Image: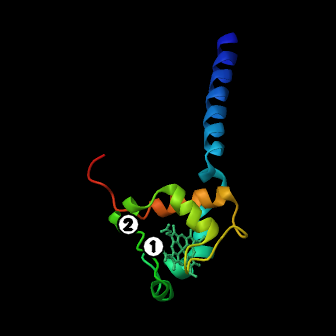
Amino acid sequence: MKKKVLYGVVVLLFFSVIQFNASDTFAGKIDYKKIYNNDCKKCHERDGRGTKRGKKLGVPDFTDGEWQDSVTDNQMIDSITNGKKKMPAQKHKLSPEDIKAVVKYIRFFAPKKKSY
Ligand code: HEC
């Protein structure tokens, strides 16, 4: 009987640790895909390559590996927060956490590297 209780406690602990970790990452809380679709897709397109309107304004191709390598996360955060040329600033719309999450989303557009 005692053993069963102990086992239960261990299992409970195990799952609470997993849950804690999941909610600790912003990805668990912030729906970056929704942010992207609401605020960014109209220029950057669902696939990250840019809409007609976006291309006219000069959007980069998020699926271009060289472009991905050329920008740091902090640079993207700055550009999204404060704007960059024709790119509108998002600081009044998105929180710093939202912006960090959406940068992570932009990284998903990068082509898979052969080796790391
Ligand atoms: C009105 C069109 C428009 C919208 C909406 C828009 N962007 Fe952009 N974005 C641009 C343009 C144009 C550029 C290219 C800026 C430049 O370098 O000239 C750009 C550049 C960027 C860059 C590269 C910045 C850099 O440092 O080179 C990132 C990252 C980015 N956008 C993310 C986003 C995200 C995230 C959103 C949504 C929250 C968004 N954009 C919404 C037009 C837009």
Of 3 and 27, the residue lying toward us = 27
Query: Which quadrant: the N terminus?
Result: top right
Residue at the image position 52 percent from the left and 60 percent from the top: 75
Closer to the observer: label 2 or label 1?
Answer: 2
Instruction: Calculate the distance from the C-alpha at mark 2 to the C-alpha at mark 1.
Output: 12 Å
Q: Quadrant of residue 77?
A: bottom right
| Image coords of residue 114 (percent x, y) | 26, 53
Please give the residue where the numbered disc 1 appears in the rendered image.
48
| Image coords of residue 102 (percent x, y) | 57, 62
Residue at the image position 58 percent from the left and 62 percent from the top: 78
Tell me which amino acid carries mark 2: Trp
Q: How is the image coloured?
A: rainbow
Would you call the spot at circle 1 few (<14 residues within 10 Å), some (14-19), or many (20 or more)? Answer: many
Please give the residue where the numbered disc 2 appears in the rendered image.
67
Which of the two discs, 2 and 1, labels the residue nearer the N terminus? 1
Of 24 and 68, the residue lying toward us = 68
Element type at mark 1: loop
> Taking 108 as reference, is 20 left or right?
right
Check mark 1 vs ligand 1: CB closer than 8 Å? yes or no: no
| Image coords of residue 80 (percent x, y) | 59, 67
Q: Is residue 34 visible?
A: no
